[in-house]
Structures are given as structure tokens and as C-alpha cells.
Amino acid sequence: MDVFKRDDLGFPTFWTLQIIGWGCVYLSALISLLSFLKRPGALSALVGSSIFVAALFCASCALRPFCRSLVKRGLSWIALELRGILYSLLAGAAAGTAIQLADLRNSGFDWINWIQISMQSGFMLFFWCSLYFSIKLWQQSIRERERLLRAEGEARDARLSALRYQLNPHFLFNSLNAVSTLVLEGNPPAATRMLAQIGEFLRTILDNEAAPETPLSQEIAFAEQYLAIEQTRLGPRLRVDMDVAPETLEALVPSMLLQPLIENAVRHGVAPIVDGGTIRIASKLHGAKVEIKVQNSGPLSPRLSRTSDPANGIGISNTAERLKTLYATDHQFLLQWPEAGGCEVTVELPFRKSLQPQGEAPCAR
């Protein structure tokens, strides 16, 4: 039946609770009359109880629109209860009058009995109003909390999208600048190959830009695509060492986590050096966390990392902001300069696996 449907929160509707609640009141009244079944006047007591519960049921239905209007006005709990007392006394008086008129046992209108019934009815209806207010305010608080959560989620997604879109022009500018350099150096085949690699890489980004998180295996594939572009530009000067633990490949990480870190490492730790250098990407499980490291063997120092040029720090600052947006305080993002030289970026995230099966993951090497 439609009467017993549930609302958007999965909570029983008004009529479901109304029928069940007053049904329980009537059942308790019947149980209390069991001991009087063999006594004179049992039938009269049964009729009286039935009339009493029916009158209260109708009175509470009549109270509903008034109570609902009070809740919609956003009144405080005390204000609701004070008005609930007034409405309950009025409804109780009306119910007492209806009960007196319907009770055929009385030859006339008994004012003393009317006052007693009206007070009893008013008390029960006040309890009904308080219960109604409690349920409605509780439902409002849940809906408000869900609305805030949706708003926070939408704001977070918008911020993540803005941060990701910040990366794409930065990467494209650097890549096209590298293509221009290859052309000026008289190496058109390398420039053509690099343009094709850039196109493929950008297509991969666009195909996956809606997901805030992706499996680490997919991020490694992105990284390999990007490193292929850089190796076209730098040749043997750029060496890559990967040490990715197989058990971490299914870990969910922020989309485009590695590319800006690797780009930063190549640009500052490999490209400026005549002999080039090594980029090392490693991952491992550390308790309930997955630890990811990007290292370069170049001479990057704290002094160089704090340059005022915004392009030099966009990969680091962008990644830090996205990690904070996604994980709040449940992550670590460390930037260190080992004594042996170079720079090391360490990211530690909660280890969560992707629920969807992925394609063939790249092998750790």
C-alpha cells in the first residue's frame, strides 16, 4: 500500500507511523481490558476505549498541518513546545467534547468527566506533538547534513578540477617549447615523434580527466608515456629506474600524481646537467599506507627549490594542494634533499584498492 511507503531518507512516512502508533495505543487499551471481560460493563468499557482512541487519532490528524507549519517556520525547540501545549489543550478539549457526545452511556453532558477526558487527551496529544517535532527536526538535520556534504563534495571536485586544469597548460607549454628546440637544433624526426607522443599523452589525460583517483598502475602508465616524451628530447641523458612493488599497483592515488613530480625532477634535476641523470620511481606498502617516491640524481638544492619563478614550483605546490583537498590530514608529502645530491619527493597515502578491475598493469622493474 502507498500508506506504508518510505520517504527519501528511508524513514516511514507520517501515515505509517500514525497508524502504527495509535494502533499500539489501542492494542494496549484492549490488553488492559482483558481482566474485565467477565465483569458487567466490559462491552461498555470496550466501546468507550475505542471512541477515546478514535477521537485522539482524528485530533492528531487535525493537529498535523498546524505542527508542520510551526516546523517550517524554523522556531526553536522551546517555542515549538509552548505552541504545542496550546494546540494540544485545544485539540484535547475538542476530543473531550466529541467523546462526551459519542458516549451514549451518559444521559447528559458531564462537565467533570469532560474536564478529566480533555486533560488526559491534551496530555497525550502534547506527547504526540513533541514526538512529531522531534522526528521532523531530526529529518531536517539529516537533510541539512547531506546537503552540506554534497556541497563540500562539489566544492572539492571543482577545486580538484581547477588544479588539474592548471597542470595541463603548464605541461603543454613545456612540451611545445621542447619541440621548438628540437626543430631549431635541426632534428625534425625527433620533433615529429615527440609531437605524436604529446598527442597520445594528452588523449590519455582527456579520457581519464573525470576521475579524481586512479589506480597506481594507471599512473605508472601515464608516467611512462611522459618519460618517453622526455627521452625523445634528452636521449640517453635521461635514465629511468623503476622499483614499483606489485602489491601497490591496485592502490588508488590522485589522478596525475606522478607526472608533475617527474616533470619537476626532469626539468631541474636532469635537463640542466650535461651528463644527464637518473629518475627513480619507487613504491611500497608501509602498514596501512602506500609510500611513493620520486627521486632525481641532479643537483637540486633547497636554495634552487625556493626560487620565486612560479613555473619551478607549480608541480610541487599543485600536488600538495590536491593531496590536502583529497585526504585532509590523512597523508604525508615530504620534499627532501639527500646528502648524495638530487631531490626526493615522498608521498604517503591511505592504502585503498580500486573496486573496478584494471587492464594489464605495467611490470615493476
Image (cartoon, rainbow, N blue to C red):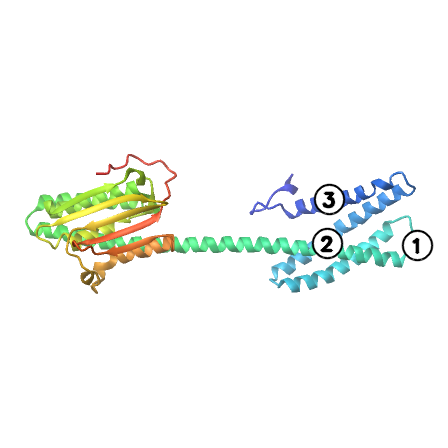
- The residue located at (65%, 38%) in the rendering is 1
Residue type, numbered disc 2: Ala
**Of the residues shown, which amino acid type is indicated by label 1?**
Gly
Image quadrant containing the C terminus: top left
For marks 1 and 3, give the one nearer the viewer: 3
Kind of residue at badge 3? Cys
Q: Is residue 262 left or right of residue 24?
A: left
Pointer 2: what residue?
Answer: 62
Estimate how packed mark 2 is, as few (under 14), some (14 to 19) or many (20 or more) residues with alpha carbons within 10 Å.
Answer: few
In the displayed orientation, state which residue is furthest to the right: 107
Badge 3: few (under 14), some or many (20 or more) residues near its Cα, within 10 Å? few
Q: Earlier in the sequence, mark 1 or mark 3?
A: 3
Q: Residue at x 48, y 56 (%)?
A: 148
Determine if residue 207 is in view.
no
First of labels 3, 2 by sequence position: 3
Instruction: Choose between 181 and 335: the one closer to the eye.
Output: 335
Quarter of the view holding residue 33:
top right
Please indicate whether residue 351 sits to the left or right of residue 23 in the image. Answer: left
In the rendered structure, are the residues bearing label 3 and label 2 in contact, judged by CB atoms less than 8 Å apart?
A: no
Residue extending farthest front: 339
Callout 1 crowding tier (Cα within 10 Å): few <14, some 14–19, many ≥20: few
Q: Position of residue 18 (x, y in %)?
A: 69, 47
Q: Position of residue 154 (x, y in %)?
A: 42, 53
Left or right of 33? Residue 288 is: left
Would you say the residues marked 1 and 3 are in contact, meaning their CB atoms lie under 8 Å apart?
A: no
- Residue in the picture at 59% in, 54% down: 138
Q: Which residue is mark 3?
A: 24
Marks 1 and 2: CB-CB under 8 Å?
A: no
Q: Which mark is on residue 108?
A: 1
Q: Gap between marks 3 and 2, in whole Å?
A: 20 Å
Q: Residue furthest top?
A: 360
